[in-house]
Amino acid sequence: MLPDKSMDCVAIIMAGGKSSRMRAGGCSTHKALRTVNGTTLLDHNIVRICECGIKDIWLAISDSELELRVWTESRASSPAAAFGSTVRIIRERDPLGTIGAARHIPGKYRNVLVVNVDNLCDIDLSALVQYHLRTRAALTIATHNASFRIPFGRIETQGGRVLGYSEKPHIAVTISSGFYVLTRKAIEHIPTNCRTDVPELVNRLVDGGELVASFQHAATWIDVNDEAALAQAQLFFGHQLRSRAAGD
């Protein structure tokens, strides 16, 4: 649960994409409405946000996604209501990118938690927000390490001399987990009604001398963007979601 001083923090769930990779598997349903053990990705993230004490949630969706729009307008607020929270919809008439919709959050809020609807992660959102507040960063990115296999031989050299040769090694890389906390200062760097992606905003802040902080975590994380990832999420998060539904 967030401390009282951070209750001016609201949240926005980004679901404005076309869900192209997920739909390539043959299902026409937007990824936000795909389910893991009967719980939609959207509901999962709404509940996670509510559990950390945030009362005001915005949901960014594309105007062209009729099924998602009808579903959210009629049902999306129900899991939030159990926590005394509300869900409001931001309709993107034109694509606003991965962070552009945050510009529509009312100016009275000083901090905004950004969650991507296709990310399933057991990250401690309260700890993320509290870390952001302590560092006084303009923007904080939740990050984790992932290992990727290079499909070629890796050569280590120094002064033209080969020091080592590794065949198709795994390399650890720090990546974004798709969770962010923005201050009002960061939001003001987002143009109104203009497509803006996260890398563009981050680089704009860094170039301007603003602090962009990294919140490193080791939580389980899955980017649910295709059928294989959905099956993986079913395996890793199924028990967690069943327990939550049972009120454990």
Image (cartoon, grey):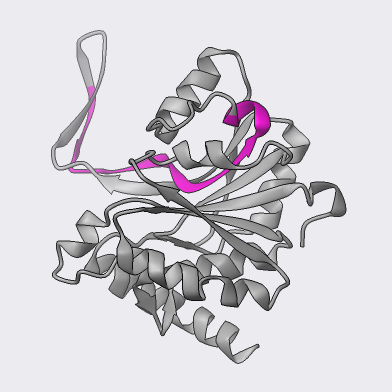
Tell me the quadrant of the picture where the C terminus can be found.
Answer: bottom right
39 relative to 209, above or below? below
Q: Residue at x 53, y 19 (%)?
A: 206
Tell me the quadrant of the picture where the N terminus can be found.
Answer: bottom right
Q: Give how far across and how far down residue 209 sits, in percent.
A: 60, 13
Q: Give how far across and how far down residue 185 sits, in percent.
A: 65, 26
Q: Give how far across and how far down residue 16 sits, in percent.
A: 38, 51
6 relative to 37, above or below? above
Chain part drawn in magenta: 163-187
Q: Residue at x 44, y 81 (%)?
A: 238
Q: Is residue 189 left or right of residue 176?
A: right
Q: Is residue 10 left or right of residue 152?
A: right
Main SS of the magenta segment? Answer: strand
Q: Is residue 67 left or right of residue 105?
A: left
136 relative to 127, above or below? above
213 relative to 91, above or below? above
Q: Residue at x 46, y 39 (%)?
A: 99
